[in-house]
Amino acid sequence: MNGITTNEVASMPSPARYTLWQLVRYALSLGTWGFGGPVALAGYMYRDLVERRQWISESDYKEGLALAQLMPGPLAAQLAIYLGYVHYRVLGATLVGVAFVLPSFFMVVGLGAAYVAFGGIGWMQAVFYGVGAAVIGIIAISAYKLTTRNIGKDKLLWAIYLSSAAVTVITREEVVWVFLGAGVLVWLWRAPPKFGGARHSIAAPVAGWFALSAIDWHKLGQIGAYFAYAGSFVFGSGLAIVPFLYGGVVKEYAWLTDRQFVDAVAVAMITPGPVVITTGFIGYLVAGFWGAVVAAGATFVPCYLFTILPAPYFKKYGKRPAIVAFVDGVTAAAIGAITGAVIVIGQRSITDRITAALALVTVGVLWRFKKIPEPVLVLIAALIGLVVHPLLIHR
């Protein structure tokens, strides 16, 4: 075939049913309206791109989810980057990644400016009181759909799924060794390696100019180095990075007080897009706009590289039985972790009968009315929080 090998043919992207700019617009929209953190965002991408629009195949989504779980960094951003890579390679991955992250970055910078100007964000806690409960309902529906679609009747995958969910609930974090172990287990069970044959390795090896004269270059260097380290070596998604950040931002460098750090996490939870964008808010409090740029950039650039560098190997060898089995195992563990995360996050967000009712009503509405936009439910929940939460505090 003109010197092109079978593997190279398999790794070539199939004709896309969408343009690159359609996908970029979708990523921009998801980054603007996608509440709920990495679990919900992964569910939205599956629902919108695999089920509804059928732009991305089931297998490509599963490969992206597996890679995002195995590599350090924020799951939702890595999954979006990989899905951009599927048909439009590095250009697609880059544009989709930037479009996904930018809306929430500008939001947290704006909130950071308001925080510094007016002091504190008590009203945000009221908003999150309602939004957090509604988000649990959204995540629960997403986890249910992922489970029923991907686990099927395979007893081994169910065992992995349930075990991963249990580990997530007990440890309150996503354990990368569970994903790796699950992948290896299914690989050895379904397609054990034949020793002596050929072996293939799948190991993987933006800004403007504002007040440059006022920049504290030493502090920016510290911020860049620390957040690059955080983005490179912290596994798990969303809030998994929070304890790590607390140790450096509050304890080691004393950039923020305990209260400021808690407020930073609250900002991340009530804004759409990836939860890890809290690094942008932290960076703003420490060193203004350029602190936000450096902190967010240093966090997301490693995850971008950890996605596009191994992506060609996933595309080239991803259809081999051994790799399919490995991805199935990792996917089952990942979905189990997502289900477990519903319980973990629910314990933080559902604190009384009102929040429990909000979560249940959200599940019921999404179950009954399939096409209702989640942002509408989130907005209603935020308004309820603004009204109810102050009454509860002063009761």
Image (cartoon, rainbow, N blue to C red):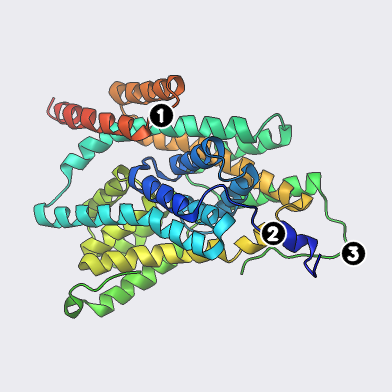
| Sequence-first disc among 3 and 2 | 2
The residue type indicated by label 3 comes to Gly
Q: Where is residue 257 drawn, in percent x and y? A: 22, 57
Q: Residues within 10 Å of mark 1 (few under 14, many from 20)?
A: many
Label 1 belongs to which residue? 137
The residue type indicated by label 2 comes to Ser
Secondary structure, mark 3, is loop
**Residue 322 vs residue 7, the one in the foreground:** 7
Label 3 belongs to which residue? 196
Up-down relation of residue 215 to residue 119 (above or below): below
User: Left or right: 28 with respect to 385?
Assistant: right
**Residue 200 vs residue 317, the one in the foreground:** 317
Contact check, label 3 and label 1, Cβ < 8 Å: no
The residue type indicated by label 1 comes to Gly
Q: Where is residue 277 drawn, in percent x and y? A: 35, 55
Label 2 belongs to which residue? 11
User: Left or right: 2 with respect to 293?
Assistant: right
Q: Residues within 10 Å of mark 2 (few under 14, many from 20)?
A: some
